[in-house]
Image: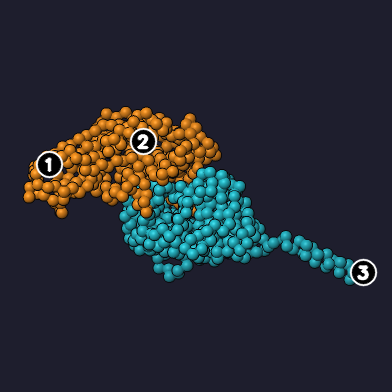
């Protein structure tokens, strides 16, 4: 009887795990490794570590490594554009921008009027009236300038091309010399306007979000020197603002932020996956297939963080306290900044 | 041609053919279309004065809005928080520097009575400001908003401060010379419009500049519209007058290169503002071999 009883218990246990094992997923745990208070930070320019990321938190910016050491930090004047190699801290109005390296050392001045915008390892200056832009190199030299007949609504770059969408419904691809290599007027909607768009890092795919009635999400595949629509969807959204879009690092997914969801597009089968979000996405890390997606969002209740699998299964969703929050997980740790503190976590499953 | 064009524009504005309204009740102009700002053209109007409610220039539909610093992923904008409305006949209007909390981004259809925001300090604004831009999407060009808005009363004439003639490295001021040697001279002028509606210390761009030699019209510069061609913004929709072509400084405009042949010549420069006030400067010169 005892053997039968034990066998039944084992079978029940196995059955439980067989039935519910797919539903029960490991919970995520965060283990804090270090904390750095930005009020009492000491710059350490002698550090030889190259593994720094830029941070921008609560009126301060700088560089921090995965051990929580600060290479450099300073107060933000009015705005900041920062990447791994350098930054421009700018005031409300400038005729000259000052480019510095990550140790705060002067590199060059740039005689231009506009705000810098560093994205996708490229550096741009957006004209004050956002209808023109230029690109600068790491030394601060202006590579090209271009004026558009309308306000720029989205900019995304690969290593060799930059996608620029404008409020007149046109998008262009500009190469490293400032030449327009592809241009398209979107004309499918009652009102034509580009709300968002991105180019994949391998230049093979463009994603666009355009128009009012209908509002269209489209994927354009490269065909020779042109791009042709491969797939398009009429969205339920009625966005009247910029939509955050992009591709996963491995180019296997594209994504789009609407008012109520983050839409992932599995590019191998054009499967759409929805992750509910509220407010605006503030930061997004999306390495790619079989990896996790990290989202920092902000709505009227404050900040929140989502960690999701690529099939849309949300592993972690939590509100974050604090008036200023930043998230980064570029350097083998989750770096979470909340007001005056930056905290490094390792992530595990329980 | 320039004079006819000016009369047409004046007619349009006097009778307010577009039927648009000023977006604020108390109009104070800081800079106007075609003026020089941050090393480029002003593509609209900058309005200052006290903080005021802003209304759309015509009934229309909200097609785009952007809050200053809504997300670090958004583009940085010198316009701060701004909105774009679509009106009839492919006209769009943009309103920049609005106060963040004043934007009404849930009401898409607006009438001319609806408040769409409040003048604010966002973007590059260092005081309460409104930037107004009008775009004709059918012809893909920026229109001088003064063409579409009710005419502002103004008794002040534009000021032709100085007129320069340059040849190689020499630069002469017209009025200070009586004779010149023959040659091809570059003619430029420091011109500012002084308007009753301008803010304190805020000279404005003129509306048209014409040059005549011995009664013959040699050049006209009209501040009516701008268009982008191959990435370059051009005033009056032709191959001339990129910003660098026109401006030698914030107020000095390059009018053209002219050949002066031996004999007596009369140079006349006419500058008009949008209200129709005109200033004329005439100079006689003896050109020698």
A99 relative to B158, above or below: below
**Towards the viewer: B33 or A81:** B33
- Say which element carries label 3: loop
Task: Tell me whether circle 1 and circle 2 mark residues in contact (CB < 8 Å).
Answer: no
Q: Is residue B239 left or right of residue A16?
A: left
Position in image of residue A80 (x %, y %): 42, 54
Whether discs 3 and 2 lie on one chain: the answer is no
Residue B147 badge:
2
Instruction: State which chain disc 1 sits on.
Output: B
Which of the image's four quarters has the C terminus of chain A? bottom right
Q: Is residue B262 left or right of residue B134?
A: left
Position in image of residue A101 (x %, y %): 38, 62
Instruction: State which chain disc 3 sits on.
Output: A
Position in image of residue B214 (x %, y %): 15, 39
**Towards the viewer: A41 or A272:** A272
Residue at screen point 29% across, 40% down? B222
Q: Which residue is mark 1?
A: B265
- Say which element carries label 1: strand
B3 relative to A20, above or below: above
Residue at screen point 50% across, 60% down? A227
Q: Is residue B111 left or right of residue A10?
A: left
Q: Which residue is mark 3?
A: A1
Rendered colour, chain A: cyan
Instruction: State which chain disc 2 sits on.
Output: B
Chain with colour orange in the figure: B
């Amino acid at each position: 009887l005892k053997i039968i009883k034990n066998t039944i218990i084992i079978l029940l246990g196995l059955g439980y795990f067989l039935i519910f094992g797919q539903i029960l997923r490991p919970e995520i745990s965060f283990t804090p490794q270090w904390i750095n208070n930005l009020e009492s930070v000491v710059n350490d320019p002698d550090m030889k570590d190259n593994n720094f990321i830029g941070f921008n938190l609560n009126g301060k910016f700088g560089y921090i490594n995965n051990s929580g050491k600060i290479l450099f930090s300073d107060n933000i004047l009015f705005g900041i554009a920062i990447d791994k190699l350098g930054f421009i801290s700018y005031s409300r109005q400038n005729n000259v921008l000052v480019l510095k390296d990550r140790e705060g050392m002067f590199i060059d001045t740039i005689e231009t009027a506009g705000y810098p915008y560093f994205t996708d390892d490229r550096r741009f200056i957006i004209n004050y009236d956002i209808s023109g832009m230029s690109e600068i190199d790491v030394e601060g030299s202006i590579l090209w300038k271009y004026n558009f007949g309308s306000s720029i609504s989205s900019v995304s770059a690969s290593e060799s091309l930059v996608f620029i969408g404008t409020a007149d419904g046109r998008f262009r691809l500009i190469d490293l010399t400032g030449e327009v290599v592809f241009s398209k007027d979107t004309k499918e909607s009652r009102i034509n306007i580009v709300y968002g768009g991105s180019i994949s890092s391998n230049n093979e795919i463009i994603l666009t979000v355009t128009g009012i009635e209908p509002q269209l999400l489209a994927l354009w595949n490269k065909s020779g020197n042109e791009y042709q629509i491969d797939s398009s969807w009429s969205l339920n959204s009625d966005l009247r603002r910029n939509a955050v879009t992009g591709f996963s690092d491995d180019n296997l997914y594209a994504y789009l932020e609407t008012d109520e969801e983050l839409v992932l597009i599995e590019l191998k089968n054009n499967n759409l996956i929805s992750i509910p979000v509220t407010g605006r996405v503030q930061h997004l890390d999306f390495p790619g297939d079989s990896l996790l997606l990290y989202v920092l969002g902000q709505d009227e209740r404050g900040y929140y963080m989502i960690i999701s699998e690529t099939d849309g299964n949300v592993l972690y969703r939590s509100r974050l306290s604090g008036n200023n929050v930043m998230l980064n997980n570029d350097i083998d740790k989750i770096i979470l900044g909340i007001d005056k503190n930056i905290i490094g976590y390792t992530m595990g499953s329980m | 041609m320039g004079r006819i064009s000016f009369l047409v524009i004046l007619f349009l504005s006097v009778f307010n053919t577009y039927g648009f309204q000023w977006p604020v009740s108390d109009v104070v102009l800081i800079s106007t279309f075609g003026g020089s700002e941050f090393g480029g053209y002003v593509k609209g109007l900058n309005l200052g004065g006290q903080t005021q409610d802003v209304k759309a220039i015509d009934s229309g539909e909200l097609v785009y809005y952007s809050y200053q610093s809504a997300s670090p992923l958004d583009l940085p904008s010198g316009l701060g928080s701004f909105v774009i409305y679509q009106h009839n006949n492919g006209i769009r209007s943009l309103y920049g520097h609005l106060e963040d909390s004043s934007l009404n981004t849930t009401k898409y259809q607006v009438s001319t009575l609806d408040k769409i925001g409040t003048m604010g300090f966002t973007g590059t604004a260092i005081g309460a400001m409104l930037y107004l831009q009008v775009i004709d999407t059918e012809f893909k060009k920026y229109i001088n908003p003064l063409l579409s808005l009710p005419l502002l009363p103004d008794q002040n004439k534009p000021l032709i401060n100085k007129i320069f003639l340059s040849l190689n490295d020499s630069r002469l001021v017209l009025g200070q010379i009586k004779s010149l040697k023959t040659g091809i001279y570059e003619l430029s002028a420091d011109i500012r419009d002084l308007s009753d509606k301008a803010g304190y210390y805020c000279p404005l761009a003129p509306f048209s500049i014409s040059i005549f030699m011995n009664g013959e019209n040699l050049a006209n510069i009209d501040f009516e519209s701008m268009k982008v061609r191959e990435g370059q913004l051009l005033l009056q929709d032709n191959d001339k007058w990129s910003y660098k072509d026109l401006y030698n400084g914030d107020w000095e405009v390059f009018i053209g290169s002219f050949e002066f042949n031996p004999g007596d010549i009369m140079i006349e420069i006419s500058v008009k503002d949008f209200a129709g006030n005109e200033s004329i400067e005439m100079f006689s010169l003896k050109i020698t071999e």
